[in-house]
Image: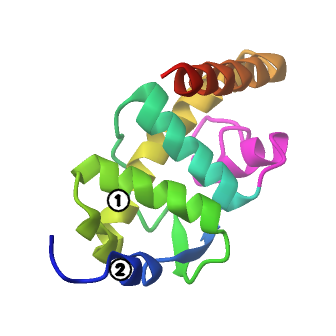
Amino acid sequence: MNEENIQDIYEETNIEHVSIPRKCYSKKGQHIEYSYQHLSNVLSMGNIEFFTLTVLLGKFVVKERKEIEGGYDQFFKMTKSNTSKDEMTILKAVAVDEVNNPFILKDYLAMRKIWVEYSYAGFDKLYEWYKKGISELEEKLSELMISNFEENVDG
């Protein structure tokens, strides 16, 4: 592996805030509830937490990335330097796992593309559960957390 210090690479790509427009997923004929803002409010999550949740759902439940219609900048605005270390550690791990190379940490745009595409796919799954009712959404999320915990404890 290259002599370059992975810790330095890791720290130079931190992101502090994910700003998601209120109607980023509202399309003609769709209700406002089909938006990141609405579902993050339903789950009482901040933007970075909700974004991380949708990335993980895309990666591990949907198991595929979904290209963004209309370009990435239309949907996500991210600023660098982070105080949310837990979420950034998770997001960076997803990017490294995706390409199987820690040096992706030097390429913010490549990481961002991975995160956004998984988030887009994960949001659709989350919304699908939400349409069946808030109790269905909470039940699905609980089942996922418990099954993943048991899988990791037993494995």
Q: Is there any visible trace of residue 71 in the rendered image? A: no
Give the quadrant of the N terminus: bottom left
Q: Residue at x 83, y 18 (%)?
A: 135
Q: Is residue 149 left or right of residue 100?
A: right
Q: Position of residue 149 (x, y in %)?
A: 62, 27
Q: Amino acid at mark 2?
A: Ile
Q: Amino acid at mark 1?
A: Lys
- Would you identify the image quadrant in which residue 113 lies? bottom left
Q: Is residue 86 left or right of residue 74?
A: right
| SS at badge 1 | helix
| SS at badge 2 | helix
Q: Residue furthest front?
A: 154
Q: Is residue 3 left or right of residue 69?
A: left
Q: Which of the two marks, 1 or 2, is nearer to us in this view?
A: 2
Disc assigned to residue 9: 2
Q: Position of residue 133 (x, y in %)?
A: 79, 18
Tell which of 26 and 96 is nearer to you: 96
In the picture of the structure, the residue carrying the numbered disc 1 is: 113
Who comes first in sequence, dot 1 or dot 2?
Answer: 2
Tell which of 109 and 152 is nearer to you: 152
Q: Position of residue 141 (x, y in %)?
A: 69, 26
From mark 1 to mark 2, how far is it between C-alphas?
18 Å
Is 21 situated above or below 138? below
Is 144 situated above or below 97? above
Is 8 situated above or below 151? below
Q: Position of residue 130 (x, y in %)?
A: 71, 25
* Number of residues whose C-alpha sits closer than 10 Å to that of mark 1, classed few (under 14), some (14–19) or many (20 or more): some
Q: Residue at x 43, y 84 (%)?
A: 12
Q: Residue at x 63, y 35 (%)?
A: 30
Give, as a single range, the part of the protein colored magenta.
23-45
Q: Any magenta on residue 106?
A: no
